[in-house]
């Protein structure tokens, strides 16, 4: 009905008809705007309460937060003082679980991405990884008690708790290694093979170094997960209280592998359910330090991921 | 010459870059293992001078145990007492398994547990009384009830108990609609739970299901302080300003007795229990020293400071 | 090679080393390395099997022995330390787990899917990156902190707002679990929506659809397997949660009659009582039976989610 607009001609009423929304289009536009705002509200209803809760914790914890809170040991029957012993305990738990889980996880990711064929065995391995990720943390605790504390004879110790945490965080490392390796283009590998390198040589010299940042991202995620878990260490090695030196080099290395240790997550649990006379601020302070620790480590991981994405050379 | 030096330096630097981080990690692990060899070990008789005494058991006693551990460590820095709570059952179970040297318990050991210790360690367990605790009945401070009798407590907490509303407990006061009693209890198997069942319900009666079971003595009081219609039982040392301790009378109509150190001492408060420490066989060595210190004036001062009844008060 | 004239100042090139020696070392070592890698790859299967084996080993004597399975599943009396007759009925615990998970999903699925839709369809650029980071940080908050929040913060609020008798109850647990499982639903759901090819969207736009119509007419049906997987993974997360529900649900053995009743879940029961039991006793083994049940449930949920996602992949290639 309308003439196509020719160059040099002014738009007239019939042209305007094309670009004016009809009633149907107006309704659709309204629905779309409503939908957009509804979905935005849904997203905000998740985000806002969390910020509110975190803000409330920070406000309640404010009186006790200071550098000495982190540096001091708990004193006065755990009703005052700081978090040094639990922090050190959590640090060593995470470090040892990392040393156990990282090699196995990275090599497993290498296997899944580089060596595994497209057959039923690979499918089962993938399924096992997904299942391992979904096992409830209390079942990990039961496994830790059955396998490490009792069967392997480690008793309740730092080693048993770390091994339990290692098994728990293994899937994270495997998955992120696999993704990081998959991100390395096939052409890199093909070029290597063309030069006569074997598969392992290719992986060692080209693939792994190029994916190291992605692997690190996964390892850092493992750290944050291991630092926050309570159930697996509750029965395998964490303890209500153990005195450690306040200063000197021994306060940095107070726990042997066979010792039981304090841990930050367990400390929060005992402060809120068992310790007598502890102020609310101290409990909130402990919760805040735990959240801050985990969020800090996670932000590191996210930052690393963004950095490596921007630095990709292919 | 200079070029060869430079090449050498470059090799060293690149080697450091490659092996620096793993090297530090390995060094830390070695340090950990070394310290593990040094101060690890769960037995109290390790060759060098750092001694570890693992203590597990009653939640009621966990705070006084921690206080003892902390105070003892100041006096004897070479001894580390590791305290774990979890319940009297935990401690006794660990004693049987050999995972701890001393088990705190707020209840007596059962005959089958004694047998198991004998089977595992070749000696009967030694029981040491280290203090006394009056098990207080807590209600919210706004609750007008002042006294409760043992029978009423049994009817509130016990199986097929008939008291479910506060208006049944204290008909004289005018209660509003929502006066259902919220029972706060402890997890099954812990010493306080067993002791309350034995002393109040009678051993052959179970707890009524549906009580809000908390994981620690302090948690019971904390919950009661936040819940106006709650009633809960916990050690008398856990009192806070937001709760009120009820007087307990042995029979309905008799005057109630308040849970104080004095009443626990003279036996007029009906629910008083000894705080016990069990060892496998006679304690010896560092464990004996620690136990002796607990029974001494210093250890008992700590007991009093935490709100329990010390041995010399209870005679 | 060695008779090349050397440039003044630089050393003569080193004679070529024989290659054979290096090759033989590599030939020895490389299969060893490859087998190590293979074993590590199969370690995931090993660990899953080991978890099943060790839990089953502790549970077996009572599972095939004195545990009355009918009473186990149908009785609501969980009285394991009774002096009269220990009863191991998990009906109340099972209903507690199912009800708190159901409530959490009721809250989390609409909000989570809505947020996933918003992030993938309506949102752009910086806001999207920021929101994704926030949701990821939400996922990182440890479960003990969530339990603490439920116990200290939401409990009193609930008493104040709803006049509940106890602040830690089914509703408290449901809210906390919803907040915990939302990040899983959002991230997996968003991946599922992003996986729908753009050609679908472009075709819909060409037919005159608005963005909202694209979402519910095109994307939801196309991504339904992925969205189902997202929901299932959220369910898996909620069922397996331990410390948060231990502190936030009130831990009471009863079948709830209202949202404000305290309840107890299977996971919290194991966590609270595992420390109190004598190793090898009946109570101890029954707790491992519960652990076995939890493992089985999470296995089934994860298997279904995996099959759903596989269904997506096979649809795409078809």
Image (tube, rainbow, N blue to C red):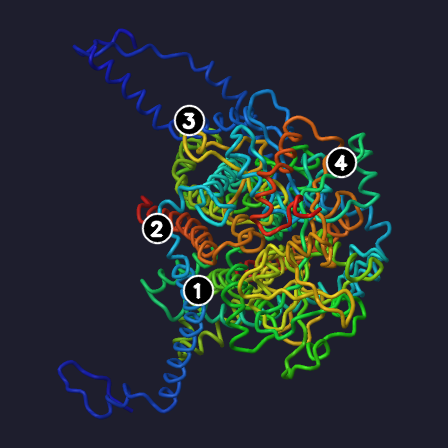
Describe the element under mark 4 as helix, strand or loop. Answer: strand
How far from the left and from the top, in percent, is residue C310?
58, 57
* Rendered location of residue A181, percent (x, y): 45, 42
| Comes first in the chain, label 2 or label 1 | 1
Left or right of residue A26, residue C230 in this image:
right
Which disc number belongs to residue A53?
1
Q: Which residue is mark 2?
A: A306
Is residue C105 in sight in this rendering? no
> What is the secondary structure assignment of the residue under circle 1?
helix
> Residue B49 shows which numbered tag?
none
Instruction: Please tell me how crowded label 1 is: few (under 14), some (14-19), or many (20+) other residues with Cα within 10 Å.
Output: some
Which residue is the site of mark 4?
Answer: B126
- Front disc: 2 or 1: 1
Q: Could you say where residue B81 lies in the image, as x and y percent from the top left?
A: 58, 35
Kindly identify which residue carries mark 3.
Answer: B23
Label 4 crowd bin: few (<14), some (14–19), many (20+), radius 10 Å: some
Mark 2 surroundings within 10 Å by alpha-carbon count, few (fewer than 14), some (14 through 19), many (20 or more): few
């Amino acid at each position: 009905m309308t003439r196509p607009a020719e160059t040099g001609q002014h738009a007239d009423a019939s042209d305007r008809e094309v670009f004016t929304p009809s009633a149907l289009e107006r309704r659709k536009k309204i629905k779309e705007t409503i939908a957009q705002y509804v979905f935005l509200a849904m997203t905000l209803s998740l985000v806002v309460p969390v910020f509110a809760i975190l803000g409330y914790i920070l406000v309640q914890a404010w009186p006790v937060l200071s550098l000495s809170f982190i540096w001091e040991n708990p004193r006065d029957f755990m009703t005052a003082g700081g978090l040094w012993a639990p922090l050190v305990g959590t640090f060593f738990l995470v470090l040892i679980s990392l040393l156990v889980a990282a090699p196995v996880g990275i090599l497993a990711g290498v296997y899944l991405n580089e060596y595994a064929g497209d057959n039923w065995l690979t499918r089962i391995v993938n399924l096992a990884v997904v299942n391992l990720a979904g096992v409830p943390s209390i079942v990990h605790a039961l496994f830790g008690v059955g396998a490490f504390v009792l069967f392997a004879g480690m008793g309740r110790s730092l080693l048993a708790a770390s091994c339990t945490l290692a098994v728990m965080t293994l899937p994270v490392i495997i998955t992120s290694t696999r993704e990081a390796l998959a991100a390395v283009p096939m052409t890199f590998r093909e070029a290597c093979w063309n030069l006569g390198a074997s598969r392992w040589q290719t992986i060692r010299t080209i693939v792994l170094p190029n994916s190291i940042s992605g692997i690190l991202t996964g390892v850092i995620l493992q750290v944050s997960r291991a630092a926050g878990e309570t159930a697996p260490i509750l029965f395998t090695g964490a303890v209500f209280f153990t005195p450690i030196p306040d200063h000197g080099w021994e306060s940095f290395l107070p726990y042997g592998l066979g010792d039981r240790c304090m841990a930050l997550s367990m400390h929060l649990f005992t402060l809120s359910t068992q310790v007598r006379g502890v102020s609310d601020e101290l409990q909130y302070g402990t919760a805040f330090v735990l959240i801050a620790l985990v969020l800090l480590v996670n932000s590191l991981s996210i930052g690393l991921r963004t950095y490596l994405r921007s630095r990709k050379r292919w | 010459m200079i070029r060869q030096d430079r090449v050498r330096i470059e090799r060293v630097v690149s080697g450091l870059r490659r092996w620096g981080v793993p090297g530090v990690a390995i060094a830390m692990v070695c340090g950990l293992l070394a310290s593990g060899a040094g101060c690890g070990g769960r037995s109290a008789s390790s060759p060098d001078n750092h001694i570890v005494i693992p203590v597990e058991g009653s939640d009621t006693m966990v705070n006084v145990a921690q206080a003892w551990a902390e105070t003892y460590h100041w006096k004897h820095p070479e001894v580390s007492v590791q305290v774990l709570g979890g319940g009297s059952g935990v401690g006794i179970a660990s004693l049987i398994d050999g995972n701890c040297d001393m088990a705190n318990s707020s209840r007596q050991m059962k005959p089958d547990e004694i047998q198991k210790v004998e089977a595992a360690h070749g000696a009967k367990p030694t029981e040491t009384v280290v203090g006394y605790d009056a098990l207080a009945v807590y209600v919210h401070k706004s609750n007008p009830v002042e006294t409760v009798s043992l029978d009423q407590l049994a009817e509130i907490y016990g199986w097929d108990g008939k008291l479910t509303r506060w208006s049944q407990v204290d008909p004289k006061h005018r209660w509003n609609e929502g006066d259902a009693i919220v029972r706060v209890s402890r997890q099954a198997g812990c010493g306080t739970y067993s002791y309350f069942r034995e002393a109040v319900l009678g051993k052959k009666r179970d707890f009524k299901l549906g009580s809000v079971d908390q994981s620690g003595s302090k948690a019971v009081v904390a919950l009661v302080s936040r819940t106006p219609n709650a009633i809960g039982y916990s050690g008398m040392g856990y009192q806070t300003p937001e709760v009120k301790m009820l007087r307990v009378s042995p029979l309905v109509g008799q005057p109630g007795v308040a849970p104080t150190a004095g009443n626990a001492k003279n036996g007029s408060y009906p629910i008083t229990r000894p705080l016990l420490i069990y060892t496998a066989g006679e304690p010896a060595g560092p464990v004996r020293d620690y136990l002796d210190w607990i029974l001494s004036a210093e250890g008992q001062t700590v007991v009093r400071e935490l709100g329990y009844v010390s041995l010399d008060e209870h005679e | 090679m060695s008779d090349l004239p050397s440039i003044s100042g630089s050393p003569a090139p080193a004679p070529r080393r024989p290659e054979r020696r290096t090759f033989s070392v590599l030939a020895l070592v490389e299969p060893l390395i490859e087998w190590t890698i293979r074993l590590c790859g199969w370690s995931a299967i090993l660990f899953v099997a080991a978890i099943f084996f060790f839990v089953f080993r502790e549970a077996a004597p009572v599972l095939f022995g004195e545990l009355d399975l009918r009473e186990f599943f149908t009785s609501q009396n969980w009285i394991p330390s009774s002096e009269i007759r220990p009863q191991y009925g998990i009906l109340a615990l099972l209903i507690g787990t199912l009800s708190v998970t159901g409530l959490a999903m009721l809250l989390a699925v609409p909000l989570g899917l809505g947020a996933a839709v918003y992030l993938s369809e309506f949102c752009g650029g910086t806001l999207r990156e920021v929101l994704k980071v926030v949701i990821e940080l939400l996922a990182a908050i440890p479960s003990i902190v969530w339990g603490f929040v439920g116990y200290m913060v939401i409990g009193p609020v609930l008493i104040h707002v709803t006049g509940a008798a106890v602040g830690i109850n089914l509703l408290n647990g449901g809210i906390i679990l919803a907040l915990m499982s939302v990040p899983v639903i959002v991230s997996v759901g968003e991946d599922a929506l992003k996986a729908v090819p753009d050609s679908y969207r472009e075709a819909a736009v060409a037919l005159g659809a608005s963005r909202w119509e694209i979402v519910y007419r095109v994307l939801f049906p196309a991504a339904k397997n992925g969205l189902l997987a997202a929901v299932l993974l959220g369910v898996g997360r909620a069922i397996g949660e331990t410390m948060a529900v231990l502190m936030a649900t009130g831990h009471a053995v009863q079948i709830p009659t209202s949202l404000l009743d305290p309840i107890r879940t299977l996971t919290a029961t194991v966590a609270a009582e595992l420390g109190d039991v004598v190793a090898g006793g009946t109570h101890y083994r029954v707790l491992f039976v519960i652990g076995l049940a939890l493992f089985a449930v999470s296995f089934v949920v994860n298997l279904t989610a995996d099959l759903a996602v596989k269904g997506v992949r096979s649809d795409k290639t078809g």
